[in-house]
Image (cartoon, rainbow, N blue to C red):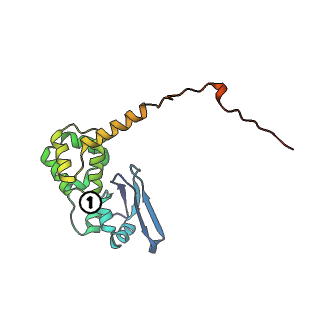
Amino acid sequence: MKDKCTVYNKSAGHVVYRLPELGLRRQFYPREAKKDISVNELEKLAQTPGGRKLILNYLMVDDKEILEYLINGRVEPEYWIKEEDINNWMSTCTLEEFQDALDFAPEGTKDLIKAHAVSLPLNDMSKRDALKKQLGFDVNKALELIASEEKKEEVKPVRRVQTAESDAPKRRVTISE
C-alpha cells in the first residue's frame, strides 16, 4: 500500500476536519484541486468521531485499496463519480441508474447532482421528477427562482419625481486653520 493518496472534495460545500493529535486542521473548498494526504492522516481521521462519514460522504479517496482499508469494507459504485463527470453522466445514464445514485450515492455526490441539475440544466423530466420524489429537490422551482432573480437585476428602478440640479441642496466646505 502507498504512503500517500489523492483526496478530493466531492461535495458542493466546504469540508473541514481537525486532528488535534497531529496538530492539523485541513480545509477543502468546493472545486478545489486535489490534495495529496498521507495514509496515516486518513487513518487518524477514520478513527475520529464522524471521520468515516466525512470520508464516505464528502471526500473522495482516489485509491480503492486504501479506501477499503480505511472503512473496512466496500463502497457503492456511485462513490467514484467525480464532479467533472457528473454532467456527462446525468445526460447518458438511464433513469434506473439515476434513481440508484439518488438512493445510494454519498451525500456530497447528491449535493453535486442537485447543483449540476440546475446549472446544466437537466432536461430529462423523468430525472427531474426522480430528484423531487427521492431528495425533495425541485429543479423546476430552482430554475424559476434563478430566472426571477435575473429579471429583478435587469429592471432598474426609475425615479418618479425628477429634481432639477438647482433644487439639490448645496454643500459648503469651509477649511479652518
Q: Quadrant of residue 128?
A: top left
Q: Is residue 162 left or right of residue 166?
A: left
Q: Quadrant of residue 68?
A: bottom left
Crowding around mark 1 (Cα neighbors within 10 Å: few <14, some 14 to 19, many 20+) is few
Measured along the vertical axis of the image, is residue 59 above or below residue 149? below
Image coords of residue 16 (percent x, y) = 41, 62
Q: Is residue 32 left or right of residue 124?
A: right
Three-letter amino acid code of the residue under disc 1: Lys
Q: Secondary structure at mark 1?
A: helix
Taking the spot 31% from the left edge, 47% from the top edge, the residue there is 83
Measured along the vertical axis of the image, is residue 104 above or below residue 159? below
Taking the spot 42% from the left edge, 31% from the top edge, the residue there is 154
Placement of the C terminus among the 4 image quadrants: top right
Say which of 65 and 47 sits in front: 47
Image coords of residue 147 (percent x, y) = 33, 36
Tally the numbered discs. 1
Taking the spot 26% from the left edge, 60% from the top edge, the residue there is 64
Q: Quadrant of residue 165?
A: top right
Measured along the vertical axis of the image, is residue 141 above or below residue 57? above
Q: Is residue 87 left or right of residue 160?
A: left
Placement of the N terminus among the 4 image quadrants: bottom left
Image coords of residue 72 (percent x, y) = 24, 70
Question: Outermost residue, bottom direction?
Answer: 21
Question: Outermost residue, left direction?
Answer: 96
Image coords of residue 60 (percent x, y) = 32, 57
Say which of 160 and 83 sits in front: 160
Question: Outermost residue, right direction?
Answer: 177
Which residue bears the numbered disc 1?
Answer: 64
